Image (cartoon, helix red, strand yellow):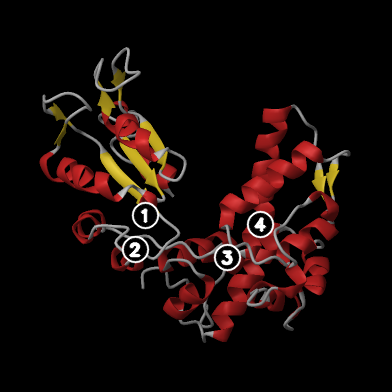
Amino acid sequence: IANASHYNSLRAKKSFIKVNCTTLPKDLFESELFGHVKGAFTGAVEGKQGLISAANGGSLLLDEIGEMPIELQPKLLRILENRTYRQVGNSKELPANFRLISSTNQDLNQCVGQNLLRQDLLYRINTITIKVPPLRQRLEEIPLLTETFIKRFNEKYQKNILDVTPDAYEKMFSYFWPGNIRELHNVLERAVLLCQSQKIHAQDLYLEGSPENRSGINTHIVGSAISNEPQSPNNFAKEFTSLTLEEIERKAILYVLEKTNWNKVAAAKSLGIYRARLYSLMKKHGVTDESGQDDFEE
């Protein structure tokens, strides 16, 4: 979403700088973000351009902003309000010109209550919020994501993984995915690295905990759309492998629309997507309402 937001904006030709707030050491965070001048601190033998400067004219993504050190948050707030900043060890005000995109998997209001995030900063960054449903509510996306990641890792590690077996998909469909897409990314990267054949099997997938003992896994929508009956993860995986992704997507949309009496708002909410996205998918798959009208101008 952050990539799409940047590359479809007027800043698309400028830099898109990504910062993971969980990986930057606390004592280096300020220097990395704002930059520093020569001699600003012990070991600063030369000046360094900060990430804010690197994002000039473009976009800056602060991933997991709830993990940003609390003492640096007033400085970020000041940049957003005044559009200027100072490098570490420099009293000169420098212009700041970037669009801030922040992401988190935490409840930021809870972070405020726990004194991990400033209330005024939350107000400042909370202009437009896009809530992405967890991966466990979007199991139908796993095959496409898997294909994308495997292609990427094949190129990165000079591997030749050609397929994922049904038992591997069954294992992925049965898992709760607490780490969402990032966890899927890491699981597949490890599988590609360690796989001894051209197919990824269930035993190649290392998942934290026992999937069989996890609760709250929602395979109902897609599973029921395929066979008209609620399915266990095992049966769901078997049915799934006999259909294309396009067929599954269309069946899921029809199933939810029928269950909601063709109420587009309720159907979109059930699917975890925006109504405009639902209309787009209906048009893509030639799905019309009961009266035979497309109803895309609603």
Q: Residue at x 85, y 44 (%)?
A: 199
Give the Cα distance between marks 1 and 3.
42 Å
- Label 3, secondary structure: give it: loop
Q: Which numbered dot is residue 66?
A: 1
Disc 4 marks which residue?
Answer: 142
Q: CA distance from mark 2 to mark 4?
A: 30 Å
Question: Alpha carbon of mark 1 to alpha carbon of mark 2: how far?
Answer: 7 Å
| Label 2 environment density (alpha carbons within 10 Å; few <14, some 14–19, many ≥20) | some
- The three-letter code of the residue at mark 3 reads Gly
Q: Earlier in the sequence, mark 4 or mark 1?
A: 1
Left or right side of 216 for 31: left
**Mark 4: few, some, or many residues within 10 Å (few <14, many ≥20)?**
some
Q: Looking at the image, is 187 positioned above or below residue 136? A: above
For discs 2 and 3, the disc positioned in front in the rendered view: 2
- Secondary structure of the residue carrying tag 2 is helix
Where residue 104 appears, as percent x and y from the top left, is: 41, 55
Q: Position of residue 240 (x, y in %)?
A: 77, 65
Determine whether, in the image, residue 295 is placed left or right of residue 84: right
Foreground pick, 254 / 208? 208
> According to the image, label 2 marks what residue?
111
Marks 4/3: CA–CA distance: 23 Å
Q: Is residue 293 visible?
A: no
Residue position marked by numbered label 3 in the rendering: 286
Q: Amino acid at mark 2?
A: Cys
Give amino acid for label 1: Gly
- Residue depicted at x 47% and y 71%: 294
Q: What is the spatial separation of the Cα atoms under label 2 and label 3, in whole angstroms?
A: 44 Å
Q: Is residue 23 above or below residue 127?
A: above
**Which residue is pictured at 28% across the width and 50% down the height?**
70
